Structure formats: C-alpha cells, structure tokens
Amino acid sequence: MTKNVSAQAVSLSRRRLLQASGIAVGGLLLATAMPFARRSYAEQYVNKGPEDAPLSTSTALGAFLRIGHDGRVTLISPKIEMGQGVQTGFAMMVAEELEVPLNQVVIQEAPPNEKLYGDKLLGFQATGGSSSTRSNWEPMREAAAAARIMLIQAAANQWGVSPAECRAENGMIIGPGDRQIGYGEVVDAAAQLPVPESVPLKKPEDFKVIGQPLRRLDTPGKVDGSAKFTIDLQVPNMKIATTSTCPVVGGKLLAVDDSRARALPGVRDVIKLDNAVAVIGDHMWAALQGLKALDIQWDYGPHATIDSEQIERALHAAFDREGAIATEVGDINKAIGSASSKIEAEYEMPFLAHATLEPMTCVAQVRGDTCELWVGTQVPVMAAAAAAQGSGVQPENVIVNNQLIGGGFGRRLESDFINQAAAIAKQVDYPIKLVWSREEDTAHDLYRPHYIDRFSAGLDSNGMPVGWSHTIVGASVLARFAPAAVPPNGLDADAVEVSNKPIYKLANLKVRYVPEAPKAILNSWWRGVGPLHGAYVMESFIDELALAAKQDPVAYRLKLLDEHPRAQAVLKLAAEKANWDQKLPAGHGRGIAVQEVFGSYLATVVELQVDAQNGIHINRLICVADCGIVTNPTSVRSQLEGGTLFGLSAALFNEITVHEGRVEQSNFHDYRQLRMSDAPPVEVHIIPSAELPGGIGEAGTAMIAPALVNALHAASGKRIRRLPLARAGYHVV
Amino acid sequence: MLTLTINGADHQVDVPDDMPLLWVLRDVLGMTGTKYGCGIAQCGACTVHLDGMAVRSCVLPVSNIAQGQKIVTIEAVGQSDLGKKVQNAWLEHEVVQCGYCQSGQIMSAVALLDKKPQPNDEDIDAGMSGNICRCCTYTRIRGAIKSVSQA
Amino acid sequence: MNVFSTLWGSVTRGTLNGAVSVALTLTALSVQAADDATIKRGEYLARAADCVACHLDENGGKPYAGGRGFKLPFGMLYSPNITPDNETGIGTWSDDDFVNAMQKGVGKDGKHYYPAFPYTSYTLMSRDDILAIKAYLFSLPPVKQPNKENDISFPFNQRWGMMFWNFLFNPNERFQPDPSQSAEWNRGAYLVEGAGHCGECHTPRNLFQARDSSRNLGGAVIQGWKAYNISGDKATGIGAWPDEALASYLSTGHAEGYGVAAGPMAEAVNHSLRHLTPEDIRAMVVYLKSVPAQTYGLARPEPKMLSPEPPAKGNNPLGQKTFADACVSCHLWDGTGRQSTFAALKGLRTVNDPEATNLVQVLLGGGKLENPHGDHFMPGFARAYSDQELAAVTNFVLDHFGHAKGMITAEEIAKRRNPE
C-alpha cells in the first residue's frame, strides 16, 4: 500500500526526518551504501555492460528501509514513480527478502542525496536510462535481507536462542517452541546490531513474490482521482503562477506593461524574470487571463532569425568536421574499397518534444534562507541546485519533496521549470504553484536531438558486410547536461550508443561522432535516449544490406549474430510469432528489428498494409524480450506495450520545427499524439531468463521505428530514411 | 454567484463567467482528480459528465452550465455501479501507468458504456479517441472496456 | 431594385445636419466634457467602422499602427500607421485631410488609395462622425512605426489611375436618411452600408474591382473565404433567419442552426460588431432583412436529425476516423456541439458547400470568437494532419452534416494550403 503522497507534501518537515543517516528514532533505518566488501552483481554487470564508460563512476548506491514499531516497512525509494512501476518492483524485492506481505510496505520518495541515492549506472541521483531495476536489483534485496538477518538476530538474542533456529515469515520472527514476535517489537534492538558482513540472497527458484504478475501499488489512487501529482498539490496560502517565457532561446525580457493584467479579478502579482514574465493568480484561469493581458517587449537575442532549414544545413555541414572516433576496428577504407559492392545511406531523425500530459509544474516556497519544493522530478539533487540558483539560497537549504510524475519521458530530468518556480517564489511571501500552459510546455521543451547518420558498407560476393562506416552528427546532450562527463575529444557515449558496439559481427568497423549543437534549440534526453537513435539507424541499414544481398532480413541478421545467443533467441521467437515465412498479400509487409538495448534483448515485428493514398494500417505488432529475471511480468508487459506505442507515436507523427527562432508547434492539434484509433494491439512475449535484469522502460520505444520503416519498405518498396512518416505524407487508417 | 451541482452536492462559486469548469473544480473547489492537459479539448484529460454526457471541462465556461445540470467527476463516478465496474476493470487490467490521463479515460469510458453497453472496436475508437494517453495504455484500456461490457 | 440608388437618390449635398449644429453649440459651452464625449463617440464609431481590423499587424503589432499585409491579385498592400505620430502616422493631418481620406480616398500627400481601404463605403459617413473618429485616434498615444512599402505591380502601381476609378465607382456622397423608412432602418442602413462597410466583402466585385451594386450584399469570395449572401433572400440569404438569430450572429458571431462566424467575419465580430449597442444591432437587423433578395450562392441546409452515436462505417472511414480523433470532442456526432452550441454544425451553409471553401479554411487555420462569457475557439489542423486526412474529414463533414456530396481531393487541400 502506498501512502498518500500529497498528505506528506503538506506536512513540511516529515521528509527531513529521513535525511539523517543511521538510526532513526523508534525504528530501524538501514543504509546499504556500499556496506559490503564484495562487488555486487550490479557492479559486475556495469563493468561489462554497454554503459561502462563514462557514467559508471558512482561511489555510492543504496536505499533505506525503515521499520516502525508497528511493523510497517517504509521503503525510501531512490527512484520516482512515473508509471513505469518501479516502486512496486522495489517493494516486491523488499517483500521477498524481508519476508513481509507486499501490502505492509509503504513507499516514500528519497530526498536529494547523491551519496546515498546516486544511481550506480548513471553516476548520479536520477530516474532514467531504464536503470532503476538494474541498479537496485542487488542492493535493494541486500538491504532487505540484511534487515531480516538483523531482526532475526535481535529476536534470537531476546529469546536466548541461536538465530539458526529462527526464521522470518510474514512480518514475524518465528523461533523454537512456537515462539514468535513481530518485527516492530525487535526493531530497536536490531538497530543496535552491526550490519552483517555476509548477506546471502534468495535463489530465483525460491522466489515467492518476485516474478509474480502483481498489481501495482500506486494505481488505486489513479482511478478514483485521489492520487496527487504536483499539479494537484495545495499548500496553505498557495497561489497559482503561470509564465510566458521569451519565445526565442537566449532572449530577454525588456519591458512589460502589466496594468491591464493587474486589473483583472483574481490576479495577485506580476513577476518579472530575466527571460520570462509570471502572472500569479488565485486560480489558473486568472493567471492565464492575466498573461494574455500583458503587453510584453522582448529582446529576442541572437537566435531570432534561426529556422529549421539553417539548423539542418549546419548539421549537414558538420560531416566535414573530424569529430571523435567512437570505434575503429580493422581497415575500413581497404575493406570497403575491395568489396564487391558498396551500399550507402543517410538517415535523419527530428527534434522531439516530450509532451508529458502533466505539463511542467512545481510548487515552491522561499522563506528566509530556505527554499522548499514539492515537485515531481527525475533528478532531486539537480532540482535542488536549480532551485538554489533561482532563489539565491544555498543548495543545502533546499528541501525537495518528490512527487508522483504525470509523464516523465526524460523531460523531468531537466530542472528549468524548477529554477523558474524558485525565482518566482523568491519574489513573493507565499508559496506558488507554477503551472505551464500546454503551449508553453510544447514551445519551451528541451528536445530530443535532431540526428543525421551516414552509413557506408562494403559487401562481399555473398552479400555479407566486410566493412562498415558510420558517421553520426547531432547535438551532444551530455555536453549540455553534464559537461564534465564528456571526454576531451567530445565523444558523447549516449550519441553513439548501440552504434559503437554493434551486436552484428563486423570485421572492419569505424564509427565517428561529430557533435553539433543547434542554435535556438536546447536538447535533452528523451525516452529511449541513445538506443532509440542507435537502433533506428542500425536496424534500418542492416535491413537495407539484407535486401541488397537479396537475403531474408531475419536469416541475414542471424548469420551476423553468432556471438549473441540471446539476440538470436528473441529474433527467432519474434519471427516465429509473426509467421515470418508466410507470404502476405500485395500491399502488405513485415519489418523486423533486433537489438540489445538497456541490457535487454528485444526483437520487434511490424506487419502492416499500405494503401494507394499512403494510408498505413498496422495489423500486428509483436515485441519479444529477454530482459533477464523479471520482477513483475505485468509491469514488464505494460512497459513494452506502452513504450512501443510511445515510439510509434513519434515515428508516425512528430517533428519539432523552428521559424524565426521560435518552436512552431504549440499543442496537441499541431503536435499530434497517438490516439486509440491509431493504436494497434501489442503482442508481448517474454523469454524466461535467469540472467540479471535488463532495463525495460525504454526498450520497446527504441525498437519500433526501424521495424515500422522496414515493414513499410516490405509492403511498398519505399524506404523512408527520415522520420516521421507523416513528413513523407503517410497517415494511419 | 453560481450554483453548481457536483457529485450530488450544490456548490456556490463566485467566479468569472468565462472561467472553464476545469479550473473551478481544481483551483476553487479543490477537486483535483480532473486534470489539465491541453486547454483546447484535444486531450480529454479534463473529461467530466454533464447530465451524463462526457464533456471537456477545459473549454466549458461555468456560465454555460444551467442551474440544476448535474456534474459528475472522477471523485464520484465510482458511486454508480457502472463507474465502479469501470474503475475495477482498470485495476484488474493494470491499465494505469503514470495515471495522469486516466481520470479522463475512465469518464469517457463510463459515458461510452452507459450509451453502448457492448461496444465493439469501432465504438471504442469513436468514443475514446478524444482522450490521449501519453504512456499509450490504449491496448489495456480497450481490454478493460471490453471486460466491463462482457461482465 | 438597387439599394444604393434608393439610398443615394435621397442624398442631399450638405454635410452637416441640424443635430450636429446643436452638438457644436454644446461643445462651445463645455470644451473638455464635449471633447471626452466626442472621443468616446469616435471610439464607438471607429469600432463600428472596424478600423483596427486592418490597421493592426496581427503578429505583435500595436493597434492602429498598421503594417498588416493584404495579398491582392496585383500585389501586396500594407495598411498604414494611423496613430497620431507626426513622422510615421497621421499626427500632422488636418481635419480636411482626414475627411478627404475617408470620403474621397485621397491621402494628405494627394495620393489616391486603393479601394482595399473601404472609402467607397466610408464616404457615406458624415464629416462629423469622421472627425469624431479622428478625435479618438488623436487621443491615443502615437506609435512610431514607419509604413511598409506596398509591392504593387504595373500598371496598378500608378495611383493616378485611381482618379478615373473613383470617378466611375466612388459616388463621394453622404448618407441621407430615407424619410419613408423608420429611424431604426435608417440607422441600420448607415451602419451596414457606411461605417460597417459590409458590402466590401459581401457584394461581388466587377472587372474593375468595384462593388457590383446590382448584386448588393449577394455574397462574394474574398481572401479565400466565402462572404455569404446576406441579402433578404429566404433560401440563399438571411431572409429566413429569425431576427433574434441574426442579432445573435452579429453581436456574438453565432446563431445556433444558422451560422458561426469564422475568418474575416470572426474578426469583424471580435473587433467591431460585438461592441455595438443592442439598439444598433437591432437597427442593422431591420435594415438587412429589408435588403432586396439576391438569389445567389449556397442555400442554408435543412438541419439533419442525426443520431448522437457515430454513424456506421461508410465509404469514408478515414474521414470518420479523423473526425473521431480531432473533432468529436467539441462537435459531437450529431453536430449539436458538446461544450457549447458555438460548435454546432447543423444548419450551417459552411457544411453544405460542395466547394468547402470556408470549411477547409477553418480546418486549416482554426477560428476564434471573443465573448465576455468565454472565448470560443477552434485550433487549426494544418500542421499535423495530412492532405488526405483533411480532404477525408472535409468530405465526411459535408456528407454527414450537410446535403452536399463532398468531393474534395488531397490535391485540392494542398492547393488551399498555399494559395497563389
């Protein structure tokens, strides 16, 4: 059972109690910040996984468990819930090792604390990169198991028996001679005990909770309107703020005539910021009406003449620069030069907005030298820093109360709106809830980079690749987000992910990356991140090679996947489920894609038909995953279904464009999203696996676009190399 | 001063005529289950029932609501048998992901099932396509609606 | 019978009537008060004449500072700055300069205006009313904003040519009341034919781009929109509209089952008509209902009785799908309007036009009607919907809500996206 998050939000100081490390009053507070001498499975995994450099420099990992005198277990989650089901997954891991019923676990959000809650894979405290289960699979269970051992020890001490004679079950310790005692009764004693040196974990075959398709803990409040997202919070004396930010990035506010706005009923204040104006009202309507009544003069700054065409020209021009070599194996020039045939292709992916359905919103209050935030954020520490910058208080004096997120998709890895909320709150003596209008949200996003990829491959007389050259041009998100994480040569590991270590056997290989930051557009992470880009171009190009070699795309891929039995397995199962070998009528086609993404192996098949008017109808969409041990199969299925369709929505419809420095899209009528009538059913198949868990929240998203364009080619003979399909005149029927 | 009948209770509100019902519910009456998504009736997150019909409260000025018209929101939709069934189906089918759109989805689904107790796929498309789910839970929404119709 | 000849038949050449003389006397008694009153009256008349519609650059311009571009068959024309700025506006203009511009279409510099500026209607306005407008404009803060150069091709850039045009087409005559009609009718005629310049859009033009007075208010196509027949004809005009419907349309842009203003008409409502007094609206209704019938153009469709349920999937599934996706949230399957009757589609000429002129315009660009009880708007779907989808939804709307067979093609939508 989850606690009502909003209730916590209003009680301002509760979270602060949890910031102490060590023993909390009246309970056991267990930190697992690297308490164990041996390397964790997760750590071992990291060092051979695709994300080993440069983000895996985390020094602390951990989670806190707190057991109250009433026996209730509080799991302080280092990861925020945004629909991916992660907190239920954590609760299941804890229930498993701690031997408590799932409904006895209460979840609270972790405060900002890099040392305790920094993510092992990502290198900082964040919910993203499909890392949550991977990073916490080991420590979360270890924390629970350690707590169980300590509780048993405490009970054994009390009874004067050996702990070996005792066991934990259903929130109780059971000892010899029908002795039993609840966890709550021994927590104080347990808290005095040392954390055990060795914490054996259950074997998968002994799992009772993990692996069960259990219902999520956070859903009941989401079907009756009682769950509180940031936008729903009501802090005493709070007023609502909404902003107009300069439509051009880098622009500044020159002047504003607010006389008409201030005269409107319900408008309380008009606040000037460097690059924005905020209207504060008793309610959102007053604030919105006030905003409309402002007469604002902007200095649009240096980017006011930029349009999409210029940005694309600059990206194309960047191919002439050297950039950074991501991978170089063998002699690519020789290999391609002496090949029997040569294939070239260029792919392009547009800027994408996140369009979370809950727009950017943050409650902030500045009192003296402290700033308190109630905000759904994927990055609590960065949120605190942004609020500190906006409000002028010290970062350690920022309290972050993290909240349920109404759609993250990477957008809430950014803290621009939190900075803005704090800057507004600084100027007034009451708490404000900043709510962006949909129009502001769409036009002031930080967008998925526009990438252009050029490939050149040489094929031998059997049509198999002997040389593979790949150049990537696009903005480096990492260079803006965490410049220190970028090596001197500018190689952004995210920009080259999947591409730099192809799962296909390629003897001669060169992958080059040229960073090119567009003017007038800021770039950020977008669900699927590096693999979304990598999978699209790799799986499009390999399909083109197979067709050039006049070979079946599945058979061709299998020949190149000797070293990846898990990839082979998902590919084969996907082909089997899709009846790959069965012929389709004219105008119909199947497309496939396979990759290792986020530590999981996925194969996605699209079967579609296309009519003479470019109307596409997807008849089948199949997604096969081997994501290692599954904590909650229902969550995995949900993420694959939703994530795949999320990627489909963008691949079909979405493209952010710029005119005179401004983003041209504003709302769902011109930045369209997949609807019920567009959405095909997604058939998900999970391959049972004893491997370590892989990421799943973004995996489906990464795989759909290449399967889609490959299917479209199979159906119509037309190869779409630039997304979205709508750009080429396609629509859904 | 307007009187609005919401979830069976009368509420007196002193708000501008042009204020959409959405903001009256959320910011004046504190009923935040009804969500803001787009403000232009393109996403359906703000869907409530007005005399049983699904309406987008973000573009419904309160002064357009006649005295005595019955407004039902997500907070009370479960008081009807059908509403409760739909909410339960949502849980049984594990429809929800981030959950932000689901208030609106449920309100639209209840209105659809009220008119058409056994909707086919086309009916579901026609009745539910005004509601956007960015987590794309459409497959499960469809399944949940069908399970109610078969119950 | 030609309305203009009726009107102008009774025109006498004097410009001031008795009532104005009284007003002038009052002015002498209390200068400041009268000035304020004049300014107030000028503001109202400027609204009635909808000056701001043209003299405002919608892309962030200031009211009356001009700069709005008009695409004409022979080039681009930009509205000038009419704020009282001495350098870039009309700050140095005398009363006579201003009156000449409004009545004769001649600027202070002696140059002739193009009749995109509706002086052939304004010419009916009294000098007194025109000077009240000037007083209002001069009460506003000056805006320094140089006028944009027009881009007019030869021979139309030869402004002296307008002298002959004016000789032929601008009567340069003031309105005189028709004593055989009521005061209300006369007020309505003054507003419709003069200040309101309705005929500038609703009366078809001849070869010389002058209004064809033989078809007064009989409907025309302008700026890619159909300005519908607003003569008294029962089928194709507004003759069958109840007075309340017509009054509602003029004052709110909406009359359920009859019409919803969009495009340039929505602008006229937003900027001008909705600010007029109920008395003036009534006067316009009285006059419009009396305008001799012109049987011309589209008939208003008999509203269909439709089911609130979606129709069975017909031969246009894409149109029906697009309607379900993007339209039904506001319009409903029976076209009665979900949140508001402003979104009602039944009975509109726009959904009964096989050419779908206004329908496609609205689908592409959306629409907005300002209203003290809440603005009514529709987003434009041009950017995110394909030509096929827009053609299909156009045809679905025509078939489903009107009696016209929709035959709009994707190619046609493409053309209308980028009109020549």
Image (tube, coloured by chain):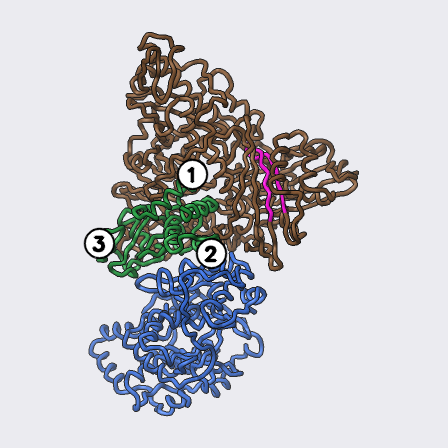
Chain colours: A brown, B green, C blue
* Mark 2 neighbour class, 10 Å CA radius: few under 14, some 14 to 19, many 20 or more: many
Q: Residue at x 23, y 54 (%)?
A: B13
Which disc is residue A39 wearing?
Answer: none
**Discs 1 and 2 lie in a common subunit:** no
Question: What residue does disc 3 label?
Answer: B12
Callout 1: helix, strand or loop? loop
**Mostly what secondary structure, the magenta segment?**
strand
The magenta span reads: A590-607
* Mark 3 neighbour class, 10 Å CA radius: few under 14, some 14 to 19, many 20 or more: few
Q: Residue C102, percent across and down? A: 40, 79
Q: Nearer the viewer, residue C127 or A473?
A: A473
Which disc is residue C325 wearing?
Answer: 2
The image shows residue A509, relative to residue A177, as above or below, that is below
Q: Residue at x 45, y 63 (%)?
A: C366
Calculate the distance from the C-alpha at mark 3 to the C-alpha at mark 2.
35 Å
Residue farthest to the left, as pictured:
C29
Calculate the distance from the C-alpha at mark 3 to the C-alpha at mark 1.
36 Å
Q: Residue A705, percent across and down? A: 58, 45
Determine if the magenta segment contains residue A593: yes
